[in-house]
Every structure is written in structure tokens, then in C-alpha cells.
Image (spheres, rainbow, N blue to C red):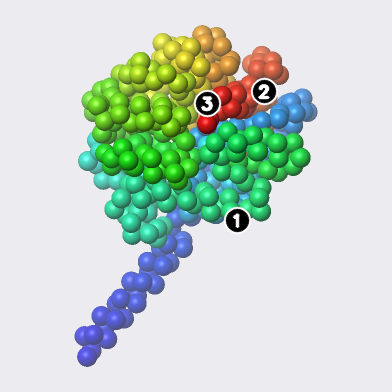
Amino acid sequence: MKKRKWLLIALVGLVILYTLTVVIVPNILDGQKNTTQQLPPYAVSDKALAVYNSLDFIADLHCDALLWSRDLTINNSIGHVDFPRMQEANMALQAFTIVTKSPVGQNFSNNTAEAFDNITLLNFLQGRPLSNWFSLFERAAYQSRRLQKFANDYNDEFIVVKNADDLNRLITLRKQNKRVTGGFLGLEGAHCLEGKIENLDKLYQEGVRMVGPTHFFDNELGGSAHGMTKGGLSEFGRDVIQRMDELHMFIDLAHASPALIDDVLEQTKNPVLVSHTGVRGTLDNSRNLSDVHIQKIAANGGLIGVAFFKGAVTAPLTKGIVDAMKYIKAIAGVECIALGSDYDGTISAPFDVTGLPLLVEELLNQGFQESEIRLIMGENVKRFMLKNLK
């Protein structure tokens, strides 16, 4: 009897300890991993603020906020993005990208899928459903549903964009109420398909409209820029790209190996994008795009989202972001340039989403015209999506 009593006490103790862990630890990790180098409020010149306030459509191609336990319907003191801060920043559209696996020791050069997975541990610490602990696909579906739930809870001021009608509705509503904002879903690595092409259709039904074939390691689709093989598309990868084209899903070549980029550009008939990247012309590493690929993606009618973190761009980061944009403009034109922050992707950003006026100030300082700034800050994304989203 005493033994059973002590077992019960131990079990209750474990439940209490786990509950406290779920309540406390995720916010600590979020605050430690997603930092800003300059905290709000942000001060800019009158001219930069006037240009920023005149922008009709501000958009960003990459944010991992759904990975964290943060409630996106409230203004948070940690992280980079939530709905109230998007409204404060007058942001029209944010891509919410889904991370399902991340190897311990993650680096730009050589990672293996067999390494211990950080996201499994994070799901445990966050108290997410048991299905998320063991299935990459379920993690992707769960994060997709979280965005829809947040939207449902936000008084019709957030729209999950799944098709051209949704986007046109967002644009129309914003003419009447600038507080209306929106987002669309992307996958950071198609390993969450678990080798089953039918899972692509299931995630499409969940609202996913952008897919990066690879993340930090090689998978069933092909080679990562940071994997062991640096290979191109596999046969399964070719099948997935074909099905993505049929569904009019956006192919995201961030983290793809050069060989995989070449294979995708050879196969697809649709414009592609790179949601968050730097360029080798300003920072030469395996993470960043070569001149040849910049020019090919631009010629394809695609977009290049410039990221906001060290390793993609040079320091100081705000200047480095614009340096990369200036380089792309010089060799491929301004029509392919977009924002690709990688907010909430375990980065130290120069500012959170409300600090985007600082980027406009740096664009002005480096000689960009107001018409070019409008394109970079979101009009290029709007044009791309109106043309390619079905």
C-alpha cells in the first residue's frame, strides 16, 4: 500500500513538474532564441517615416512564429512578429513558414538527417500533442491549424490567404481598414511529407501554398545546401515538383543545393521564389545565392527575399540587408527583390516587425528611389501572388 502511495505521489510530482516546464520554459527559449539588436520604439527621419507611411502593401516572405508557443493574437514582449505588431507596422501580408525538424549542431556546411532533432524536444517542452512528438507530418498540420485558429480569434482582422480570391479580399478590405492584415503558409523543408506525395495534397488542404524542398539536411526530395551530398532532385523530388506545379504551389528554393536549384529551374514552368537568403556577391558562403542563380530566378519571373540575419548578410545588419538588395538590383533589377526576414527563426534580427521603417531609411540612404522602395517592401510580392496564386 505504501509503495502504491509513493508511486502516486511521484506521478503527481512529475505531472506538476512537466506542467510547470510547459508554462515556463518555452517562453524562456523563445526570448533567448529570437532576439533583436535594437529594441522598440524605433526613431527614423521624417522623410523615411513619410515614405513608409505611404506604402500601400508591405509583405515579408519568411517568419517561423508558428514554431513557438506565443499567442499571435496579443502584443508580445518577446520574438519578432505577432498580429498586433503587424498592424502597428502596417504590414499587409506575412508568410508563416513551418519548421518540423532541425538537427543538433545545425550549420551552413554539413548536416545529417540522423542527428538528434531539436524540434522533437521543443514539441515535448511545449506540451504539444503526442502525435507531434513522433510525426513530422502532424507537426506541419498542427502549425497550419494554429494559424487558422489565431485568425478565427482575431475579429475578422486577419485573413489566411489560400487563393486569389482571399488575396483580392485582403487588398479590398485594407482600402477600408488598414488594420486588416493577412498571412499565408509555407513549409521549410518537405521532409514532413514523410516520403508520401499524398501528404502534399493533405497539406494543401490545410492551407499550405509554399514549399521548400529541403531545409538544413538532405531528404527524400534531394540535396540541401547544408547537407552531406549537395545533390539535385531525386525521382520523388521531381514528382513533388510536378504536383506542386499542378496545384500552383510556390516552390521555395531557400536552403536548396545549387544542383537542386538547377534541376527545379529546368523542370518547372512556373516562377519560383527564395523566401529568405543572402547573396554571395556581398557574403560568400554556401547559404547564399550565386550571381548565376540570382539572374536565372529573376529571368524566371521569381522573387528573392533578402534575409535579416548574420550569415545571410553582413554587419551592421540593416546596412547589410540593403547592400544585398543593391547587389541584386545591379545584376538582375529591382523587380525580383523582396523582404525575407526569417523572423522568429532563432535569429538575432536588427529590429522586430515594427522596426521596418529603419529599413526604408537605409534604402533611401543608399540611393533607392521611392518607386523602387515600394516594389521591395511589398509590391513585388503582391504582383507575384496576384499572377501566380490560383
Answer few, some or many: residues within 10 Å of disc 3's Cα (few below 14, many 20 plus, some between 14 and 19): some
Give the vertical position of 364 relative to 16 (above or below): above
Instruction: Estimate the spatial distance between the alpha carbons at disc 2 and disc 1, rounded to whole Å.
Output: 31 Å
The extreme top residue here reads 331
Residue 35 horizontal side relative to residue 39, left or right: left
Q: Amino acid at mark 2?
A: Arg
Numbered disc 1: secondary structure: loop
Q: Classify the position of the N terminus by image quarter.
A: bottom left
Q: Which mark's residue is nearer the viewer, 2 or 1?
A: 1
- Residue at 35%, 27% in the rendered image: 242
The foreground one among 27 and 43 is 27
Give the x, y percent position of residue 64: 47, 41
Residue indicated by mark 1 = 153
Q: Is residue 309 left or right of residue 370?
A: left
What's the mark number on residue 318? Answer: none
On the image, which quarter does residue 251 sit in? top left
Q: What distance separates the C-alpha of mark 3 from that of mark 1?
A: 29 Å
- Residue 308 placed where, x, y %? 52, 30
Residue named by callout 2: 374
Does the rendering let one see residue 2? yes
According to the picture, the residue beneath numbered tag 3 turns out to be 388
**Picture residue at 27% right of the left edge, 86% below the top:** 5
**Residue at (39% x, 72% y) in the render:** 16
Foreground: disc 3 or disc 1: 3
